[in-house]
Structure formats: structure tokens, C-alpha cells
Amino acid sequence: MKAKIGKSYLTEVPHEGKEISFQYPVFRGRYGNVAEQIDKEGLNRPNSAETASLVYDAFQNPKGEYESKIIKILKDRLFWEFTGNFYLPKSNEEINNGVILETNPKIVNGRLDMNKESLIKRLQKNDSLVKFVSFGYKTGEQKEIELVKNPYIVARYGEEGAQKIAEIASKFKNNPKLWSFDSVSDEKTRMSALGYDWLFGNWLDVDGDYWDDDDGGHAFGVCTSRKDK
């Protein structure tokens, strides 16, 4: 990646066959507050796949001036990913017993606002920003080869992003962990985050059940077309 000074940008970050850019420095705060800061700058909120591309690219040059700061955020705090998780219990409804993933979900008063009926309609219309994964995917500790093939990880990050997340996980001593649910008894909405367990071990945390609105969360706004020029 390269940096452009003035209003600074992290550019030339490979992502799904193209390159994307992020505004620098990073935004910090609670989930809704960070989203608001990004919106005010006219930027896009980073989804899971874009976050994976940014962090993966940083590890290609871990001692770089900007790359090292990205890695430090991952290790010291966490990155917000603007992908919402709507968990559904087992029921007689057509869509049940799994999780609906929504890219760039609505946020109201700083909290996720995900409407089940609307999400199901979008699934039925094959909206690419909404995915459903049935329970049965592995949660908790897993090997990198398991992580890269995990249906939840693939739905959240895409196939390329899943590969990148597995590569990031390989930079740590212990196996990564996916924090999610094996089942739920009632509907739950949860935030997505990517971080590192510095308290109990040395592993990558992929969090799909984040409920504590941590004021130490971070995100780099994604530049809209030509904004980094």
C-alpha cells in the first residue's frame, strides 16, 4: 500500500480483483459513533471483506509505517466490520435455524436495526448484500484449513476474504476462534468485529456475536470513487 499526504489515504489495497483505498487516520469509538464519523466524511463503512483485505495487506509489509499501525490496532483493540448478524431460532418459518448476514446494516441510535421480514424478502430476491447460513458450521477454536472452508466465514468474507482471514490467523501462535452461536432460542442481532485475544492467548478472534458496544473499536472509512485522487 501507499500513502498520500494532505487528507491522507491508504491506497492500492488489493481487493476482489481491483484496488480500494481507505482514508487515514482511523476512526475510533463505539459502533454507531464510528459509523456516523465515516458517514460525515462521505466515505463508505468497511464491510467484512474490505476489512480482511486491509489487514491482510498490512501483514505483507508488517514493519511499514502505516501497516504496523494497522496491525497494532488489531492486536491492541479491534476492528469494527459493518456486517450485521441476525440469528434465528429453529421454527416452522421458511428461513430459520441459522444466521442472516447483512452488509452495511441500518444503525439507529447507535445500535443495529435489522428487520427480519425485510431481510427475508431480500434473500428471496437474491440480494448480494444479504446471505443466510444454517447452523451447523463450526464455532470456537478451529484450524486455519477449517476456518477457510467454514460456511459462515465464506458468507461473511467471500471466498477471497476467507483465504485472507486464514492467512491473517496464521500469523498468531494458536488456532483462531470464531465467536458465534451453535443455536439460539430467540432472535438476536449482533455486531461483527475482528481482533486478537491478548488477555487469554495468542490467536485471531473472528467475532460474530459482539454485543458489548466497545468504545475502543476502530474502522478505516472506504473511499468512494476517485475520493483518494
Image (cartoon, rainbow, N blue to C red):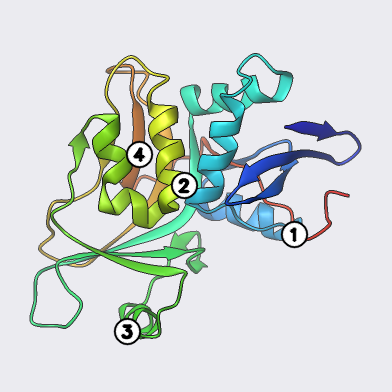
Q: Tell which circle, 3 or 4, labels the residue nearer the N-terminal end.
A: 3
Per the image, the residue denoted by label 2 is 160
Marks 1,2: beta carbons within 8 A: no
The reply, left or right, for residue 17 in relation to residue 6 is left
Q: Earlier in the sequence, mark 1 or mark 2?
A: 2
Mark 2: which amino acid? Glu
Q: Are marks 3 and 4 in contact (CB under 8 Å)?
A: no
Residue 125 lies in quadrant: bottom left
CA gap, disc 1 and disc 2: 21 Å
Q: Amino acid at mark 3?
A: Glu
Tell me the kind of residue under disc 4: Val
Q: Give the structural element (helix, strand or loop) at label 2.
A: helix
Judged from this view, the residue extending furthest toward the front is 17
Q: Which residue is mark 3?
A: 117
* Along the line of sight, the residue nearer the viewer: 151 or 197: 151
Q: Earlier in the sequence, mark 1 or mark 3?
A: 3
